[in-house]
Image (spheres, helix red, strand yellow):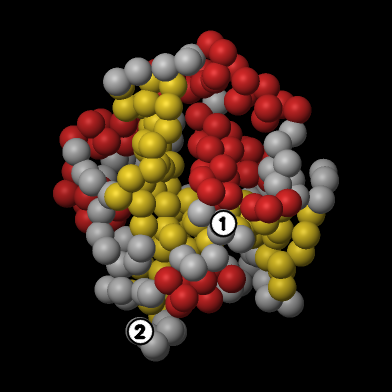
Amino acid sequence: MLLYQDVSQSEPHDCPYIEQQAQESFFLAKRVDSDELDILFNQGWRRFAYYYFKPSCLTCEKCTPIRVPVAEFKASKNQRKILNKQHKQYPEFRVEFNEKLYHEEIYQIYKSHNTRFTQACDSEENFINAHFNDTCDSIQSEYYLGDQLIAVGFLDVSDNTISSSYFIYHTDFQHLNLGTLSVLKEIEYCKQLEKQFYHLGYWIEDNQSMAYKNKFFPHELMNWHTQKWELITKS
């Protein structure tokens, strides 16, 4: 695939994260190879279904790409508490990393997860088309409590990186800190595969639902002006 061969600009629209107008650069691709995916991740692009995008807002640069250099990551005291609680109080908890495979239980988790927000759920068909396609190499992380599936992560995999594309959990289990727990488990998996980076997508300081993303140290934030990643060692 020739990168950026048909890059377009979206029309201005309401931003789903903060109260202002947003705009994106985007292109569609049926297939992106792992080495090409690395280039896109390094330049701040993200993927949804066959849609590759990055913000191009005229009045805002708050959507900041964020990634964790895997080899240097050290869990904080609070993050270690979350891991220890999961091991001690819920010994039946486990995580599996598998090839993408849809089943109806995943859609039910998505519907529960979506009650946390105001937007309507995608139809089951749209949900499948968005997350179960082969536009790039990808896998899913599955979080179980005993035999019950309680959360699923969708992960894009390039030569050097695993990128969290989307994560959903059943709200009955939100007391398990599944957002933070999923990042810790997926960083562990990156280490096993000897990947260089774990991408968390975009971070917006003013958006509370993204507040957990910059709690993993060290991490790197991309400067849109210089196109360089800047290391953040501690808050």
Q: In the rendered structure, which disc, 1 or 2, sits on the residue that comes first in sequence?
A: 2
Residue at image mark 1: 194
Q: Is residue 20 left or right of residue 126?
A: right
Query: In the rendered view of the protein, which quadrant contains the C terminus?
Result: top right
Which residue sits at x=38%, y=20%?
Answer: 145
Amino acid type, mark 1: Glu
Residue 137 image offset from top left, x and y in percent: 36, 63
Q: Residues within 10 Å of mark 2 (few under 14, many from 20)?
A: few
Of the pair 43 and 35, the residue shown nearer to us: 35
Q: Residues within 10 Å of mark 1 (few under 14, many from 20)?
A: some
Query: In the rendered view of the protein, which quadrant contains the N terminus?
Result: bottom left
Which residue sits at x=75%, y=28%?
Answer: 77
Which residue sits at x=70%, y=47%?
Answer: 73
Quarter of the image where one finds residue 150: top left
Residue 72 image offset from top left, x and y in percent: 73, 51
Q: Is label 1 or label 2 in front?
A: 1
Q: Is residue 154 left or right of residue 214?
A: left
Which residue sits at x=51%, y=71%?
Answer: 38
Q: Secondary structure at mark 2?
A: loop
Residue at image mark 2: 1
Residue 60 image offset from top left, x and y in percent: 64, 64
Q: Secondary structure at mark 1?
A: loop
Residue 219 image offset from top left, x and y in percent: 71, 53
Q: Is residue 191 left or right of residue 125?
A: right
